[in-house]
Image (cartoon, rainbow, N blue to C red):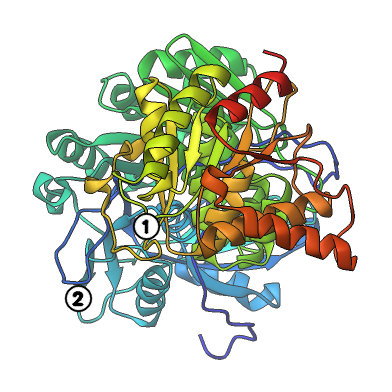
Protein backbone atom coordinates (compact mmCIF):
# COMPACT_ATOMS: atom_id res chain seq x y z
CA UNK A 1 0.00 0.00 0.00
CA UNK A 2 3.00 2.30 0.06
CA UNK A 3 2.33 3.61 -3.44
CA UNK A 4 -0.83 5.34 -2.25
CA UNK A 5 -0.71 9.06 -1.63
CA UNK A 6 -1.84 9.18 1.99
CA UNK A 7 -1.47 11.11 5.17
CA UNK A 8 -0.70 8.17 7.42
CA UNK A 9 -1.64 8.67 11.07
CA UNK A 10 -1.22 5.97 13.69
CA UNK A 11 -3.41 6.86 16.65
CA UNK A 12 -6.11 5.71 18.94
CA UNK A 13 -9.21 3.76 17.89
CA UNK A 14 -12.81 4.54 17.19
CA UNK A 15 -15.18 3.71 14.29
CA UNK A 16 -18.64 2.56 13.31
CA UNK A 17 -22.29 2.52 14.31
CA UNK A 18 -24.59 4.81 12.34
CA UNK A 19 -25.61 7.81 14.40
CA UNK A 20 -27.10 10.74 12.49
CA UNK A 21 -25.87 14.09 13.76
CA UNK A 22 -26.64 17.51 12.34
CA UNK A 23 -23.93 20.08 11.80
CA UNK A 24 -26.28 22.85 12.89
CA UNK A 25 -24.97 25.16 15.57
CA UNK A 26 -27.04 25.56 18.72
CA UNK A 27 -25.91 27.35 21.85
CA UNK A 28 -28.54 25.64 23.98
CA UNK A 29 -27.11 22.58 25.69
CA UNK A 30 -28.43 20.49 28.60
CA UNK A 31 -26.88 20.74 32.03
CA UNK A 32 -24.66 17.86 33.06
CA UNK A 33 -24.03 16.68 36.58
CA UNK A 34 -20.55 15.44 37.49
CA UNK A 35 -19.38 11.88 37.92
CA UNK A 36 -18.07 9.60 40.59
CA UNK A 37 -15.07 7.32 40.58
CA UNK A 38 -15.76 4.00 42.34
CA UNK A 39 -13.03 3.64 45.03
CA UNK A 40 -13.57 -0.12 45.18
CA UNK A 41 -12.44 -0.69 41.58
CA UNK A 42 -9.21 -2.71 41.45
CA UNK A 43 -6.42 -2.24 38.96
CA UNK A 44 -3.60 -4.41 37.72
CA UNK A 45 -0.96 -4.17 40.44
CA UNK A 46 2.68 -3.27 40.02
CA UNK A 47 3.74 -6.62 41.50
CA UNK A 48 2.20 -8.39 38.52
CA UNK A 49 -0.89 -9.80 40.22
CA UNK A 50 -3.67 -9.89 37.65
CA UNK A 51 -7.13 -8.50 38.25
CA UNK A 52 -9.80 -9.11 35.60
CA UNK A 53 -10.98 -5.98 33.79
CA UNK A 54 -14.39 -4.59 34.62
CA UNK A 55 -15.46 -4.75 30.98
CA UNK A 56 -14.52 -6.98 28.06
CA UNK A 57 -15.67 -6.05 24.54
CA UNK A 58 -15.94 -8.61 21.73
CA UNK A 59 -14.11 -7.59 18.55
CA UNK A 60 -13.94 -10.86 16.54
CA UNK A 61 -11.46 -9.35 14.09
CA UNK A 62 -9.27 -6.29 14.31
CA UNK A 63 -10.04 -3.46 11.90
CA UNK A 64 -7.98 -0.57 10.57
CA UNK A 65 -9.98 2.51 9.50
CA UNK A 66 -9.07 4.73 6.55
CA UNK A 67 -11.07 7.97 6.97
CA UNK A 68 -11.56 10.64 4.32
CA UNK A 69 -13.77 13.59 3.45
CA UNK A 70 -15.83 13.20 0.24
CA UNK A 71 -18.57 15.03 -1.63
CA UNK A 72 -21.96 13.68 -2.71
CA UNK A 73 -20.71 13.09 -6.24
CA UNK A 74 -18.05 10.69 -4.99
CA UNK A 75 -20.55 8.81 -2.82
CA UNK A 76 -22.61 8.06 -5.91
CA UNK A 77 -19.68 6.07 -7.29
CA UNK A 78 -19.62 3.81 -4.23
CA UNK A 79 -21.82 0.70 -4.15
CA UNK A 80 -24.44 0.41 -1.37
CA UNK A 81 -26.62 2.74 0.67
CA UNK A 82 -25.22 6.05 1.83
CA UNK A 83 -24.95 6.31 5.60
CA UNK A 84 -24.72 2.59 6.27
CA UNK A 85 -22.15 -0.20 6.30
CA UNK A 86 -21.84 -2.48 3.27
CA UNK A 87 -19.07 -5.05 2.92
CA UNK A 88 -16.73 -4.86 -0.06
CA UNK A 89 -13.76 -6.92 -1.27
CA UNK A 90 -10.12 -5.82 -0.86
CA UNK A 91 -9.86 -4.80 -4.51
CA UNK A 92 -12.81 -2.41 -4.13
CA UNK A 93 -11.29 -0.96 -0.96
CA UNK A 94 -8.04 -0.39 -2.82
CA UNK A 95 -9.89 1.30 -5.70
CA UNK A 96 -11.63 3.69 -3.31
CA UNK A 97 -8.39 4.63 -1.59
CA UNK A 98 -6.63 5.26 -4.87
CA UNK A 99 -9.34 7.65 -6.07
CA UNK A 100 -10.43 9.39 -2.88
CA UNK A 101 -7.35 11.52 -2.31
CA UNK A 102 -5.97 12.27 1.14
CA UNK A 103 -7.05 10.06 4.05
CA UNK A 104 -6.01 9.18 7.60
CA UNK A 105 -5.33 5.68 8.89
CA UNK A 106 -6.06 4.62 12.46
CA UNK A 107 -7.01 1.51 14.40
CA UNK A 108 -10.78 1.04 14.41
CA UNK A 109 -13.73 -1.28 14.92
CA UNK A 110 -16.96 -0.65 16.78
CA UNK A 111 -16.20 -2.71 19.90
CA UNK A 112 -12.62 -1.41 19.98
CA UNK A 113 -13.94 2.15 19.85
CA UNK A 114 -16.12 1.51 22.88
CA UNK A 115 -13.32 -0.23 24.77
CA UNK A 116 -10.93 2.60 23.95
CA UNK A 117 -13.37 5.21 25.16
CA UNK A 118 -13.88 3.39 28.46
CA UNK A 119 -10.17 2.86 29.10
CA UNK A 120 -8.68 6.10 27.82
CA UNK A 121 -11.47 8.56 28.52
CA UNK A 122 -13.14 7.17 31.65
CA UNK A 123 -10.29 5.21 33.27
CA UNK A 124 -12.30 1.97 33.32
CA UNK A 125 -10.26 -1.24 33.21
CA UNK A 126 -11.30 -2.71 29.85
CA UNK A 127 -10.18 -5.66 27.76
CA UNK A 128 -10.73 -6.57 24.13
CA UNK A 129 -11.30 -10.17 23.07
CA UNK A 130 -10.76 -11.13 19.44
CA UNK A 131 -8.21 -11.98 16.78
CA UNK A 132 -5.65 -9.89 14.94
CA UNK A 133 -3.53 -10.64 11.89
CA UNK A 134 0.24 -11.01 11.92
CA UNK A 135 0.75 -8.13 9.50
CA UNK A 136 1.67 -4.44 9.73
CA UNK A 137 -1.97 -3.46 10.26
CA UNK A 138 -2.27 -5.92 13.14
CA UNK A 139 0.77 -4.43 14.81
CA UNK A 140 -0.70 -0.96 14.48
CA UNK A 141 -3.98 -2.15 15.98
CA UNK A 142 -2.45 -3.87 19.03
CA UNK A 143 -0.03 -1.05 19.83
CA UNK A 144 -2.80 1.50 19.52
CA UNK A 145 -4.98 -0.38 21.96
CA UNK A 146 -2.14 -0.71 24.46
CA UNK A 147 -1.42 3.02 24.31
CA UNK A 148 -4.98 3.73 25.34
CA UNK A 149 -4.78 1.40 28.32
CA UNK A 150 -6.89 -1.43 26.90
CA UNK A 151 -5.99 -4.92 28.13
CA UNK A 152 -4.84 -6.81 25.03
CA UNK A 153 -4.16 -10.14 26.75
CA UNK A 154 -7.50 -11.37 25.39
CA UNK A 155 -6.39 -10.77 21.78
CA UNK A 156 -5.06 -13.68 19.72
CA UNK A 157 -2.48 -13.12 16.98
CA UNK A 158 -3.05 -15.84 14.41
CA UNK A 159 -1.00 -17.41 11.61
CA UNK A 160 2.28 -16.56 9.94
CA UNK A 161 0.61 -14.91 6.95
CA UNK A 162 -2.70 -13.62 8.25
CA UNK A 163 -4.48 -10.38 7.41
CA UNK A 164 -6.10 -7.70 9.57
CA UNK A 165 -9.44 -6.23 8.48
CA UNK A 166 -9.64 -2.77 6.95
CA UNK A 167 -12.48 -0.31 6.44
CA UNK A 168 -12.97 2.87 4.41
CA UNK A 169 -14.92 5.56 6.29
CA UNK A 170 -16.34 8.09 3.83
CA UNK A 171 -17.45 11.29 5.54
CA UNK A 172 -19.66 13.74 3.65
CA UNK A 173 -19.92 17.51 4.05
CA UNK A 174 -22.61 17.11 6.73
CA UNK A 175 -20.42 14.86 8.87
CA UNK A 176 -22.47 11.76 8.01
CA UNK A 177 -20.31 8.70 7.45
CA UNK A 178 -20.63 5.76 5.09
CA UNK A 179 -18.69 2.59 5.98
CA UNK A 180 -17.19 0.14 3.50
CA UNK A 181 -15.34 -2.69 5.31
CA UNK A 182 -13.18 -5.27 3.52
CA UNK A 183 -13.07 -8.24 5.86
CA UNK A 184 -13.41 -11.42 3.78
CA UNK A 185 -9.72 -12.36 4.04
CA UNK A 186 -9.25 -11.07 7.58
CA UNK A 187 -8.28 -13.37 10.43
CA UNK A 188 -11.06 -13.70 12.99
CA UNK A 189 -12.01 -15.30 16.28
CA UNK A 190 -14.02 -18.52 16.12
CA UNK A 191 -17.00 -19.45 18.29
CA UNK A 192 -15.23 -22.40 19.92
CA UNK A 193 -12.38 -20.13 21.09
CA UNK A 194 -14.54 -18.25 23.59
CA UNK A 195 -14.62 -19.91 27.00
CA UNK A 196 -16.28 -18.85 30.28
CA UNK A 197 -13.03 -19.28 32.21
CA UNK A 198 -11.53 -16.28 30.42
CA UNK A 199 -14.40 -14.05 31.58
CA UNK A 200 -14.48 -14.94 35.28
CA UNK A 201 -14.51 -11.79 37.40
CA UNK A 202 -15.54 -9.51 34.52
CA UNK A 203 -18.60 -7.36 35.26
CA UNK A 204 -19.84 -6.67 31.71
CA UNK A 205 -19.29 -8.22 28.32
CA UNK A 206 -20.08 -5.98 25.33
CA UNK A 207 -21.22 -7.80 22.18
CA UNK A 208 -21.57 -5.94 18.91
CA UNK A 209 -23.98 -6.82 16.11
CA UNK A 210 -21.11 -7.05 13.63
CA UNK A 211 -20.12 -10.27 15.40
CA UNK A 212 -23.03 -12.02 13.69
CA UNK A 213 -20.85 -12.26 10.59
CA UNK A 214 -18.92 -14.96 12.47
CA UNK A 215 -21.12 -18.10 12.58
CA UNK A 216 -22.26 -18.86 16.13
CA UNK A 217 -19.97 -16.20 17.59
CA UNK A 218 -22.63 -14.03 19.24
CA UNK A 219 -24.43 -16.97 20.80
CA UNK A 220 -21.17 -18.50 22.07
CA UNK A 221 -20.03 -15.19 23.53
CA UNK A 222 -23.30 -14.50 25.31
CA UNK A 223 -23.53 -18.03 26.70
CA UNK A 224 -19.93 -17.84 27.96
CA UNK A 225 -20.59 -14.46 29.58
CA UNK A 226 -23.74 -15.68 31.31
CA UNK A 227 -22.00 -18.83 32.55
CA UNK A 228 -19.14 -16.68 33.90
CA UNK A 229 -21.61 -14.49 35.80
CA UNK A 230 -21.17 -11.41 33.59
CA UNK A 231 -23.85 -9.02 32.44
CA UNK A 232 -24.24 -8.65 28.67
CA UNK A 233 -24.60 -5.41 26.70
CA UNK A 234 -25.66 -5.66 23.04
CA UNK A 235 -24.93 -2.91 20.52
CA UNK A 236 -26.87 -3.45 17.29
CA UNK A 237 -24.13 -1.99 15.05
CA UNK A 238 -26.01 -1.01 11.84
CA UNK A 239 -29.39 -1.33 10.17
CA UNK A 240 -27.86 -3.62 7.54
CA UNK A 241 -26.77 -6.01 10.28
CA UNK A 242 -30.23 -5.92 11.82
CA UNK A 243 -31.86 -6.51 8.43
CA UNK A 244 -29.68 -9.51 7.70
CA UNK A 245 -29.77 -11.10 11.17
CA UNK A 246 -33.19 -10.03 12.44
CA UNK A 247 -34.40 -13.50 13.52
CA UNK A 248 -31.36 -14.49 15.61
CA UNK A 249 -31.29 -10.96 17.09
CA UNK A 250 -34.91 -11.20 18.18
CA UNK A 251 -34.30 -14.64 19.64
CA UNK A 252 -31.28 -13.43 21.61
CA UNK A 253 -32.81 -10.21 22.93
CA UNK A 254 -36.02 -11.95 24.01
CA UNK A 255 -34.08 -14.74 25.78
CA UNK A 256 -33.40 -12.67 28.89
CA UNK A 257 -29.63 -13.09 28.56
CA UNK A 258 -29.00 -9.48 27.47
CA UNK A 259 -29.21 -6.82 30.20
CA UNK A 260 -28.59 -3.73 28.05
CA UNK A 261 -29.43 -3.13 24.39
CA UNK A 262 -28.24 0.01 22.54
CA UNK A 263 -29.56 0.89 19.09
CA UNK A 264 -29.86 3.96 16.94
CA UNK A 265 -33.23 4.93 15.53
CA UNK A 266 -32.70 3.19 12.17
CA UNK A 267 -31.61 -0.04 13.86
CA UNK A 268 -34.47 0.04 16.34
CA UNK A 269 -37.08 0.61 13.64
CA UNK A 270 -35.54 -2.06 11.44
CA UNK A 271 -35.57 -4.63 14.23
CA UNK A 272 -38.93 -3.92 15.81
CA UNK A 273 -40.77 -2.93 12.64
CA UNK A 274 -39.74 -6.10 10.84
CA UNK A 275 -39.57 -4.23 7.56
CA UNK A 276 -38.77 -5.94 4.28
CA UNK A 277 -36.93 -4.82 1.18
CA UNK A 278 -33.83 -2.72 0.74
CA UNK A 279 -35.01 0.59 2.22
CA UNK A 280 -34.72 1.66 5.84
CA UNK A 281 -37.79 0.99 7.96
CA UNK A 282 -39.46 4.35 8.70
CA UNK A 283 -43.03 3.49 9.68
CA UNK A 284 -42.37 2.16 13.19
CA UNK A 285 -42.66 4.82 15.88
CA UNK A 286 -39.58 5.23 18.03
CA UNK A 287 -41.66 5.05 21.18
CA UNK A 288 -43.07 1.67 20.12
CA UNK A 289 -39.56 0.45 19.32
CA UNK A 290 -38.33 1.56 22.76
CA UNK A 291 -41.20 -0.20 24.49
CA UNK A 292 -40.48 -3.42 22.61
CA UNK A 293 -36.75 -3.35 23.32
CA UNK A 294 -37.43 -2.62 27.00
CA UNK A 295 -39.79 -5.61 27.18
CA UNK A 296 -36.90 -7.83 26.07
CA UNK A 297 -34.02 -6.31 28.07
CA UNK A 298 -33.76 -4.70 31.50
CA UNK A 299 -32.31 -1.52 29.97
CA UNK A 300 -33.05 -0.27 26.45
CA UNK A 301 -31.49 2.79 24.82
CA UNK A 302 -32.19 4.36 21.44
CA UNK A 303 -29.82 7.08 20.25
CA UNK A 304 -31.39 9.83 18.15
CA UNK A 305 -28.37 11.62 16.70
CA UNK A 306 -28.69 15.38 17.11
CA UNK A 307 -31.89 14.91 19.10
CA UNK A 308 -30.22 13.03 21.94
CA UNK A 309 -31.49 9.67 23.17
CA UNK A 310 -34.33 7.80 24.86
CA UNK A 311 -33.94 5.09 27.49
CA UNK A 312 -36.15 2.76 29.51
CA UNK A 313 -35.47 0.56 32.51
CA UNK A 314 -38.59 -1.14 33.81
CA UNK A 315 -41.21 1.56 34.24
CA UNK A 316 -38.66 4.38 34.16
CA UNK A 317 -38.38 6.30 30.90
CA UNK A 318 -35.97 9.19 30.31
CA UNK A 319 -35.16 11.52 27.44
CA UNK A 320 -31.85 13.32 27.07
CA UNK A 321 -31.09 16.22 24.73
CA UNK A 322 -28.00 16.16 22.57
CA UNK A 323 -25.13 18.55 23.21
CA UNK A 324 -24.67 21.24 20.58
CA UNK A 325 -22.92 24.52 20.00
CA UNK A 326 -19.95 23.18 18.01
CA UNK A 327 -19.29 22.22 14.38
CA UNK A 328 -19.80 18.57 13.42
CA UNK A 329 -16.69 17.21 11.70
CA UNK A 330 -17.43 13.49 11.45
CA UNK A 331 -20.07 11.24 13.05
CA UNK A 332 -17.89 8.11 12.85
CA UNK A 333 -17.86 6.44 16.26
CA UNK A 334 -20.60 8.58 17.81
CA UNK A 335 -22.66 5.53 18.75
CA UNK A 336 -19.62 3.65 20.00
CA UNK A 337 -18.52 6.51 22.25
CA UNK A 338 -22.10 6.95 23.44
CA UNK A 339 -21.94 3.33 24.57
CA UNK A 340 -18.68 4.08 26.43
CA UNK A 341 -20.21 6.94 28.35
CA UNK A 342 -23.45 5.13 29.09
CA UNK A 343 -21.57 2.04 30.25
CA UNK A 344 -19.37 4.18 32.50
CA UNK A 345 -22.49 5.48 34.20
CA UNK A 346 -23.84 1.97 34.74
CA UNK A 347 -20.53 0.79 36.18
CA UNK A 348 -20.57 3.66 38.66
CA UNK A 349 -24.20 2.99 39.66
CA UNK A 350 -25.51 6.23 38.22
CA UNK A 351 -29.23 6.87 37.61
CA UNK A 352 -30.56 6.21 34.12
CA UNK A 353 -30.77 9.94 33.31
CA UNK A 354 -27.13 10.42 34.28
CA UNK A 355 -26.03 7.50 32.12
CA UNK A 356 -27.77 9.13 29.17
CA UNK A 357 -26.09 12.47 29.90
CA UNK A 358 -22.66 10.92 29.93
CA UNK A 359 -23.36 8.91 26.80
CA UNK A 360 -24.54 11.95 24.84
CA UNK A 361 -21.56 13.95 26.05
CA UNK A 362 -19.09 11.28 24.92
CA UNK A 363 -20.81 11.05 21.54
CA UNK A 364 -20.60 14.82 21.20
CA UNK A 365 -16.87 14.77 21.98
CA UNK A 366 -16.02 12.41 19.13
CA UNK A 367 -18.04 14.10 16.37
CA UNK A 368 -15.93 17.25 16.71
CA UNK A 369 -12.92 15.58 15.04
CA UNK A 370 -12.21 13.50 11.96
CA UNK A 371 -12.26 9.78 12.70
CA UNK A 372 -13.63 7.78 15.61
CA UNK A 373 -10.97 8.96 18.09
CA UNK A 374 -11.69 11.54 20.77
CA UNK A 375 -8.78 13.96 20.80
CA UNK A 376 -7.07 15.10 23.98
CA UNK A 377 -8.89 18.40 23.53
CA UNK A 378 -12.12 16.45 23.18
CA UNK A 379 -11.63 14.64 26.47
CA UNK A 380 -10.78 17.94 28.13
CA UNK A 381 -13.98 19.40 26.65
CA UNK A 382 -15.93 16.44 28.02
CA UNK A 383 -14.45 16.73 31.51
CA UNK A 384 -15.00 20.48 31.62
CA UNK A 385 -18.70 19.91 30.90
CA UNK A 386 -18.87 17.35 33.69
CA UNK A 387 -17.76 19.99 36.18
CA UNK A 388 -19.05 23.40 37.12
CA UNK A 389 -17.71 26.89 37.72
CA UNK A 390 -14.07 27.14 38.71
CA UNK A 391 -13.45 23.43 38.22
CA UNK A 392 -14.24 23.72 34.52
CA UNK A 393 -11.47 26.29 34.11
CA UNK A 394 -9.03 24.18 36.10
CA UNK A 395 -9.76 20.98 34.22
CA UNK A 396 -9.20 22.52 30.81
CA UNK A 397 -5.52 22.94 31.62
CA UNK A 398 -4.99 19.87 33.77
CA UNK A 399 -3.36 16.53 33.20
CA UNK A 400 -5.59 13.51 32.67
CA UNK A 401 -4.97 12.17 36.17
CA UNK A 402 -6.09 15.45 37.76
CA UNK A 403 -9.15 15.45 35.53
CA UNK A 404 -10.12 11.98 36.70
CA UNK A 405 -9.67 12.95 40.33
CA UNK A 406 -11.83 16.04 39.90
CA UNK A 407 -14.38 13.87 38.13
CA UNK A 408 -14.55 11.56 41.14
CA UNK A 409 -14.68 14.41 43.68
CA UNK A 410 -17.47 16.28 41.96
CA UNK A 411 -19.60 13.21 41.52
CA UNK A 412 -19.25 12.40 45.21
CA UNK A 413 -20.35 15.93 46.07
CA UNK A 414 -23.32 15.57 43.75
CA UNK A 415 -24.18 12.22 45.34
CA UNK A 416 -24.01 13.32 48.98
CA UNK A 417 -24.87 16.99 48.68
CA UNK A 418 -23.08 20.14 49.79
CA UNK A 419 -22.78 20.96 53.49
CA UNK A 420 -20.40 22.05 56.23
CA UNK A 421 -16.69 21.78 55.43
CA UNK A 422 -14.22 21.39 58.31
CA UNK A 423 -10.50 22.15 58.16
CA UNK A 424 -7.94 21.45 60.86
CA UNK A 425 -4.79 19.69 61.96
CA UNK A 426 -4.23 16.00 61.16
CA UNK A 427 -1.79 15.66 64.09
CA UNK A 428 -4.05 16.07 67.14
CA UNK A 429 -5.03 12.79 68.82
CA UNK A 430 -8.38 11.68 70.18
CA UNK A 431 -7.40 12.49 73.77
CA UNK A 432 -6.60 16.12 72.96
CA UNK A 433 -9.05 18.69 74.30
CA UNK A 434 -9.45 20.25 70.83
CA UNK A 435 -10.37 16.82 69.42
CA UNK A 436 -13.05 16.30 72.06
CA UNK A 437 -14.54 19.78 71.50
CA UNK A 438 -14.44 19.40 67.70
CA UNK A 439 -16.27 16.09 67.85
CA UNK A 440 -18.97 17.68 69.99
CA UNK A 441 -19.17 20.60 67.56
CA UNK A 442 -19.52 18.27 64.57
CA UNK A 443 -22.50 16.58 66.17
CA UNK A 444 -24.13 19.83 67.24
CA UNK A 445 -23.81 21.57 63.86
CA UNK A 446 -25.13 18.47 62.07
CA UNK A 447 -28.22 18.41 64.23
CA UNK A 448 -28.74 22.16 63.84
CA UNK A 449 -28.33 22.48 60.05
CA UNK A 450 -29.26 18.97 58.90
CA UNK A 451 -26.55 19.16 56.24
CA UNK A 452 -23.83 16.68 55.26
CA UNK A 453 -20.37 17.04 56.77
CA UNK A 454 -17.27 17.31 54.57
CA UNK A 455 -13.61 17.00 55.51
CA UNK A 456 -10.31 15.91 54.04
CA UNK A 457 -11.07 12.46 55.41
CA UNK A 458 -7.89 12.28 57.45
CA UNK A 459 -7.13 11.96 61.17
CA UNK A 460 -7.07 14.69 63.80
CA UNK A 461 -9.62 17.51 63.56
CA UNK A 462 -11.06 16.06 60.35
CA UNK A 463 -11.80 12.79 62.09
CA UNK A 464 -13.19 14.55 65.14
CA UNK A 465 -15.76 16.58 63.16
CA UNK A 466 -16.66 13.54 61.05
CA UNK A 467 -17.19 11.27 64.03
CA UNK A 468 -19.35 13.93 65.63
CA UNK A 469 -21.58 14.10 62.57
CA UNK A 470 -21.78 10.30 62.57
CA UNK A 471 -22.74 10.41 66.25
CA UNK A 472 -25.66 12.58 65.14
CA UNK A 473 -26.60 10.08 62.43
CA UNK A 474 -25.70 12.41 59.57
CA UNK A 475 -23.90 11.74 56.26
CA UNK A 476 -20.16 12.40 56.06
CA UNK A 477 -18.01 12.67 52.95
CA UNK A 478 -14.24 12.71 52.71
CA UNK A 479 -11.85 13.81 49.97
CA UNK A 480 -8.60 12.24 51.05
CA UNK A 481 -4.98 12.74 50.14
CA UNK A 482 -2.48 9.88 50.12
CA UNK A 483 -0.51 11.32 52.99
CA UNK A 484 -1.47 13.89 55.62
CA UNK A 485 1.19 16.03 57.26
CA UNK A 486 2.88 14.20 60.14
CA UNK A 487 1.11 10.92 59.42
CA UNK A 488 1.61 7.73 57.45
CA UNK A 489 -0.70 6.54 54.70
CA UNK A 490 -4.03 5.21 55.93
CA UNK A 491 -5.74 2.73 53.63
CA UNK A 492 -9.46 2.87 53.02
CA UNK A 493 -9.81 -0.27 55.13
CA UNK A 494 -8.58 1.72 58.14
CA UNK A 495 -10.73 4.73 57.44
CA UNK A 496 -13.69 5.74 59.60
CA UNK A 497 -15.53 6.75 56.40
CA UNK A 498 -17.68 4.55 54.21
CA UNK A 499 -15.84 3.61 50.99
CA UNK A 500 -18.71 4.90 48.86
CA UNK A 501 -18.41 8.28 50.62
CA UNK A 502 -14.67 8.60 50.02
CA UNK A 503 -12.45 9.73 47.16
CA UNK A 504 -8.66 9.38 47.22
CA UNK A 505 -6.54 12.02 45.49
CA UNK A 506 -2.88 11.78 44.57
CA UNK A 507 -2.83 15.47 43.72
CA UNK A 508 -3.56 18.27 46.14
CA UNK A 509 -5.29 20.62 43.69
CA UNK A 510 -8.41 18.47 43.03
CA UNK A 511 -8.88 17.95 46.75
CA UNK A 512 -8.63 21.66 47.53
CA UNK A 513 -10.96 22.71 44.72
CA UNK A 514 -13.53 20.05 45.58
CA UNK A 515 -13.60 20.83 49.32
CA UNK A 516 -14.28 24.47 48.53
CA UNK A 517 -17.08 23.44 46.18
CA UNK A 518 -18.56 21.15 48.83
CA UNK A 519 -19.39 24.26 50.88
CA UNK A 520 -20.81 26.65 48.27
CA UNK A 521 -24.52 27.47 48.24
CA UNK A 522 -26.28 26.88 44.94
CA UNK A 523 -29.77 27.36 46.41
CA UNK A 524 -30.94 29.78 49.05
CA UNK A 525 -32.14 26.83 51.12
CA UNK A 526 -28.64 25.30 51.28
CA UNK A 527 -27.16 25.42 54.78
CA UNK A 528 -23.41 25.27 54.41
CA UNK A 529 -20.36 26.74 56.13
CA UNK A 530 -16.58 26.60 56.26
CA UNK A 531 -15.36 25.85 59.79
CA UNK A 532 -11.67 26.22 60.66
CA UNK A 533 -10.62 24.23 63.71
CA UNK A 534 -7.10 24.47 65.21
CA UNK A 535 -4.62 23.58 62.47
CA UNK A 536 -1.18 24.04 60.98
CA UNK A 537 0.30 25.09 57.66
CA UNK A 538 -2.15 23.10 55.52
CA UNK A 539 -5.09 24.66 57.35
CA UNK A 540 -3.62 28.13 56.87
CA UNK A 541 -3.17 27.40 53.18
CA UNK A 542 -6.85 26.50 52.88
CA UNK A 543 -7.94 29.49 54.96
CA UNK A 544 -6.06 32.10 52.95
CA UNK A 545 -7.04 30.52 49.64
CA UNK A 546 -10.69 30.69 50.71
CA UNK A 547 -10.32 34.33 51.72
CA UNK A 548 -8.66 35.12 48.40
CA UNK A 549 -11.52 33.49 46.50
CA UNK A 550 -13.95 35.63 48.49
CA UNK A 551 -11.84 38.73 47.86
CA UNK A 552 -11.84 38.15 44.09
CA UNK A 553 -15.46 36.97 43.93
CA UNK A 554 -14.25 33.60 42.61
CA UNK A 555 -15.78 31.32 45.23
CA UNK A 556 -18.42 30.07 42.81
CA UNK A 557 -21.30 30.37 45.28
CA UNK A 558 -24.67 31.85 44.41
CA UNK A 559 -25.41 32.86 48.02
CA UNK A 560 -23.12 33.98 50.87
CA UNK A 561 -21.45 31.26 52.95
CA UNK A 562 -20.27 31.81 56.54
CA UNK A 563 -16.59 31.25 57.33
CA UNK A 564 -16.01 30.50 61.01
CA UNK A 565 -12.65 30.46 62.77
CA UNK A 566 -13.01 28.48 65.99
CA UNK A 567 -10.56 30.12 68.38
CA UNK A 568 -10.35 27.51 71.13
CA UNK A 569 -8.25 28.84 74.05
CA UNK A 570 -6.98 31.73 71.92
CA UNK A 571 -5.35 29.35 69.38
CA UNK A 572 -5.75 31.84 66.50
CA UNK A 573 -4.98 35.07 68.41
CA UNK A 574 -1.65 35.53 66.63
CA UNK A 575 -3.31 35.00 63.24
CA UNK A 576 -5.94 37.62 64.03
CA UNK A 577 -3.19 40.06 65.05
CA UNK A 578 -1.46 39.41 61.73
CA UNK A 579 -4.66 40.14 59.80
CA UNK A 580 -5.02 43.43 61.67
CA UNK A 581 -1.39 44.21 60.81
CA UNK A 582 -2.12 43.65 57.12
CA UNK A 583 -5.12 45.95 57.34
CA UNK A 584 -2.98 48.56 59.06
CA UNK A 585 -0.41 48.45 56.26
CA UNK A 586 -3.11 48.56 53.60
CA UNK A 587 -2.23 45.19 52.07
CA UNK A 588 -5.83 44.04 52.62
CA UNK A 589 -8.91 46.18 52.60
CA UNK A 590 -11.30 46.67 55.48
CA UNK A 591 -14.51 44.74 54.81
CA UNK A 592 -12.97 42.27 52.37
CA UNK A 593 -13.45 39.51 54.92
CA UNK A 594 -16.96 40.29 56.09
CA UNK A 595 -17.96 36.64 55.83
CA UNK A 596 -15.22 35.67 58.30
CA UNK A 597 -16.18 35.51 61.95
CA UNK A 598 -14.21 34.39 65.00
CA UNK A 599 -15.90 32.38 67.75
CA UNK A 600 -14.33 31.29 71.00
CA UNK A 601 -16.31 28.13 71.72
CA UNK A 602 -18.96 25.74 70.42
CA UNK A 603 -21.84 27.67 71.96
CA UNK A 604 -20.89 30.85 70.09
CA UNK A 605 -20.55 28.91 66.81
CA UNK A 606 -24.00 27.36 67.17
CA UNK A 607 -25.61 30.67 68.11
CA UNK A 608 -24.05 32.37 65.08
CA UNK A 609 -25.22 29.68 62.64
CA UNK A 610 -28.69 29.70 64.16
CA UNK A 611 -28.95 33.45 63.61
CA UNK A 612 -27.30 33.31 60.16
CA UNK A 613 -29.82 30.80 58.81
CA UNK A 614 -32.71 32.12 60.95
CA UNK A 615 -33.36 28.78 62.58
Side (left or right) of 349 relative to 273 = left
Residue 170: image location, x then y, percent:
65, 60
Residue that label 1 marks? 427
Q: How far apart are labels 2 and 1 at the CA level?
A: 62 Å
Quarter of the rendering containing residue 236: top left
- Which label was assigned to residue 130? none
Quarter of the rendering containing residue 26: top right
Q: Residue furthest left?
A: 197
Residue 4: image location, x then y, percent:
60, 86
In the rendered image, the vertical position of residue 447 relative to residue 592, given as above or below: above
Side (left or right) of 130 relative to 304 = left
In the rendered image, the vertical position of residue 467 relative to residue 335, given as above or below: above
Residue 586: image location, x then y, percent:
90, 65
Nearer-the-camera pick, 473 or 442? 442
Residue that label 2 marks? 159
In the rendered image, the vertical position of residue 22 relative to residue 98, given as above or below: above
Residue appearing at x 73%, y 47% in the figure: 389
Amino acid sequence: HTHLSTRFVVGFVRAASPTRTSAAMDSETPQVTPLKEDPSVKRKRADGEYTPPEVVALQPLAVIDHSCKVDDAFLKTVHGEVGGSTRIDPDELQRILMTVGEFTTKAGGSAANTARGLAHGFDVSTGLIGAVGRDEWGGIFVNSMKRSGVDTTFLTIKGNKSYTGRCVCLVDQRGQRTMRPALEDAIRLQADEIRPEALRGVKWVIVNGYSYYGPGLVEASVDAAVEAGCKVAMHLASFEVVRRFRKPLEKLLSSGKVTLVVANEDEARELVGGGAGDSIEVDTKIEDALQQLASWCKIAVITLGDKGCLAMAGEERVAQKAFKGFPIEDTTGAGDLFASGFMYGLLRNQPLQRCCEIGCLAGAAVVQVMGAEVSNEGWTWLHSHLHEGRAATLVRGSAAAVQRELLACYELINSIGRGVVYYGSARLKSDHVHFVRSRELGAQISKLLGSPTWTGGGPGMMEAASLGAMDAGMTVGGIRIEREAGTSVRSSAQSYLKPEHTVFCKFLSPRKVALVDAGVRKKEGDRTAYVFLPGGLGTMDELFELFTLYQLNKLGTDFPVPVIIVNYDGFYDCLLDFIKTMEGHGTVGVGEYDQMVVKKNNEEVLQYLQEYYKL
